Image (tube, rainbow, N blue to C red):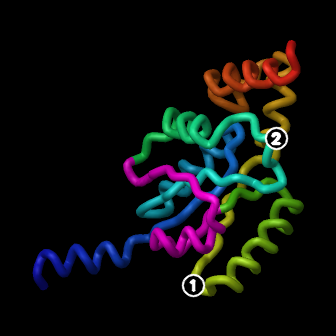
Amino acid sequence: MQAGHHRILKDAMRRKAVYLGTFDPVHNGHLGLIADAAAMFDDLLVLVGQNPAKLNKEIFTVEERLEMLRAHVRYDNVTFASTAESPPKYAKQVGARYIVRGVRDAGDAEAELKFAERWWGIDASLRTVWIYTPAGFSSSALKARVLSRADASDLCPTDVARRLLEKLEGRTGS
């Protein structure tokens, strides 16, 4: 087999996944999940999405969230992007066969099962991979901890907590 054909075949067999989240803000649960998924897949595209239910409630811009992710994730097989496309449509565009999702508890699992079923209906070749994340990791828990000025180093990187406090104080006028 010629070297060029071997490379094409190898590229076609790569396991490529998309991990979608709002990451508003990024926390240690996200970072741990990215580390796990980066170890499982040849290529991982971390996709910053916008939740229509959270429009005008977002704390950080998409660009700021991408910046924070890039500052804290350094794996050769991980790239970042943002889109307004649905996860299955975007996954297909970039040649990913897997969508990675984090699950903290039974409520998350139930919601994620509904997403997986909907996505299966759009593209039956896609597979959803759930990775467990401890329940204490959530953006709402992080926001509450930061607003109370308690130590949040177990929930997020220090610079994220600092930036989050600045944003939250700016909203409340504190």
Task: Find the magenta span and give its range.
Answer: 76-100
**SS class, disc 2:** loop
In the displayed structure image, the side of residue 4 where residue 121 appears, left or right: right
* Camera sees residue 27: no
Could you tell me which residue is drawn at 69 percent across and 77 percent down? Answer: 119
Mark 1 or mark 2: name the one nearer the start of the chain. Answer: 2
**SS class, disc 1:** loop
Question: Mark 2 — residue?
Answer: 57
Q: Badge 2: how crowded within 10 Å, few (<14), some, or many (20+)?
A: few
Q: Looking at the image, is mark 1 or mark 2 nearer the viewer? A: 2
Could you tell me which residue is drawn at 87 percent across and 62 percent down? Answer: 106
* Camera sees residue 145: yes
* CA distance for labels 1 and 2: 34 Å
Q: Badge 1: how crowded within 10 Å, few (<14), some, or many (20+)?
A: few
Q: Where residue 158 sits in the image (x, y, percent)?
A: 64, 22
Q: Quadrant of the image for the N terminus?
A: bottom left
Residue 91 is covered by the magenta coloring: yes
In the displayed structure image, the side of residue 155 where residue 48 appears, left or right: left
Question: Mark 1 — residue?
Answer: 125
Residue 48 is covered by the magenta coloring: no
Q: Where residue 157 sits in the image (x, y, percent)?
A: 63, 28
Q: Where residue 116 sits in the image (x, y, percent)?
A: 73, 75
Q: Amino acid at mark 2?
A: Lys
Q: Amino acid at mark 1?
A: Ser
Seen from the viewer's position, the closer of residues 121 and 86 is 86
Residue 151, by quadrant, is top right
